[in-house]
């Protein structure tokens, strides 16, 4: 890894095996986001609850590019703290992710991005429409949170969490996208589907033609199928994503 940033790192031998695997998975999430072009230099974040430490989570060090993230240089922080860049973490990222993970013990990972496609769908009053298979993952499973500026105020956490509720995703109006999952794989794949759904919808709407909306009963059936898929055979794709990263940069795990 070529970088001029002086890094604070941890050694694998000093970390419990479950936490190290969590670090590998979260580092992979950052690298995959960079690979797909969803990053924004050093901004936006993914987070992962630390196994066995329910009130702590892992997040990217503030000054690092996504392609500089490794398992060893992720930062472990307490979600009950009040942290900013002086602690090595981005304040808005800590505010958003700490609040979501604290409020949702049923999920362990959150992914947040500011892609242009995501911000475009977030600025449409009608929001996400059920016009493609990727969109149907989120039928009755996506919330909407109105824009309040840069997410630095802990007071916004309550409103974010109320909008997210028990959903799999949150469209942050005029801002970006958030997905959550029990695993890094689930949160990442949901984000991939949400961005695909947004892109497909925008392309379809741009034609000016009539859109074919998927009937509600089919939407609910398919969304349930996807939930079953994600908790079962769908997990087989995560090792494939890691092999893809190994082919791109074999040192990302170090």
Image (cartoon, rainbow, N blue to C red):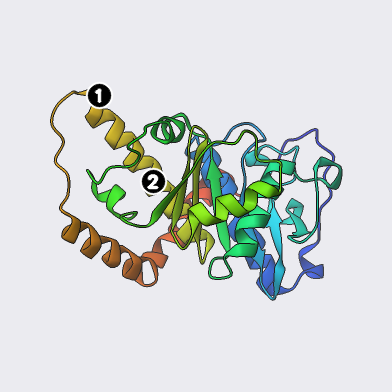
Which of 112/139 is in front?
139
Label 1 crowd (10 A; few <14 / some 14-19 / many >=20): few
Q: Residue at x 35, y 66 (%)?
A: 227
Quarter of the C terminus within the rendering: bottom right
Q: Residues within 10 Å of mark 2 (few under 14, many from 20)?
A: many
At which x and y percent is residue 211?
Answer: 16, 36
Q: Position of residue 131 (x, y in %)?
A: 22, 43
Position of residue 220 in the picture relative to residue 14 (left or right) = left
The residue wearing badge 2 is 194
Q: Which disc is residue 206 wearing? A: 1
Q: Which of 242 and 118 is in front in this view?
A: 118
Q: Distance between the residues labelled 1 and 2?
A: 18 Å
Q: In terms of depth relative to the viewer, which is nearer, 33 or 211?
A: 211
Q: How many labels does the image show?
A: 2
Q: Is mark 2 on a helix, strand or loop?
A: helix
What is the x, y in percent for residue 173?
A: 48, 37
Instruction: Answer above or below: position of 181 versus 145.
Output: below
Residue 198 visible in rendering? yes
226 vs 155, left or right, is left
Task: Evaluate whether residue 254 shows in this view.
Answer: no
Residue at 39 percent across and 46 percent down: it is 194
Tell me which numbered mark, 1 or 2, is placed earlier along the sequence: 2
């Amino acid at each position: 890894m070529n970088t001029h940033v002086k890094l604070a790192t941890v050694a694998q031998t000093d970390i419990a095996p479950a936490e190290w695997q969590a670090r590998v998975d979260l580092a992979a999430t950052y690298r995959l986001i960079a690979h797909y072009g969803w990053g924004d230099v050093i901004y936006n974040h993914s987070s992962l609850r630390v196994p066995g430490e329910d009130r702590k989570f892992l997040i990217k060090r503030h000054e690092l590019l996504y392609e500089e993230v490794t398992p060893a240089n992720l930062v472990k922080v307490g979600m009950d703290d009040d942290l900013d860049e002086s602690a090595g973490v981005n304040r808005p990222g800590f505010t958003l992710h700490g609040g979501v993970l604290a409020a949702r013990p049923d999920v362990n990972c959150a992914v947040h991005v500011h892609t242009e496609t995501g911000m475009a769908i977030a600025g449409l009053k009608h929001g996400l429409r059920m016009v493609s298979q990727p969109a149907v993952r989120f039928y009755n499973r996506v919330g909407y949170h109105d824009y309040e500026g840069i997410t630095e105020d802990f007071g916004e956490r309550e409103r974010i969490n109320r909008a997210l509720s028990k959903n799999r995703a949150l469209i942050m109006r005029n801002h970006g996208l958030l997905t959550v999952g029990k695993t890094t794989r689930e949160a990442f794949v949901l984000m991939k589907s949400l961005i695909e759904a947004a892109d497909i919808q925008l392309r379809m709407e741009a034609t000016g033609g009539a859109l074919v909306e998927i009937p509600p009963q089919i939407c609910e059936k398919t969304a349930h199928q996807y939930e079953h898929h994600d908790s079962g055979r769908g997990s087989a794709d995560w090792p494939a994503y890691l092999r893809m990263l190994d082919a791109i940069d074999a040192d990302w795990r170090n």
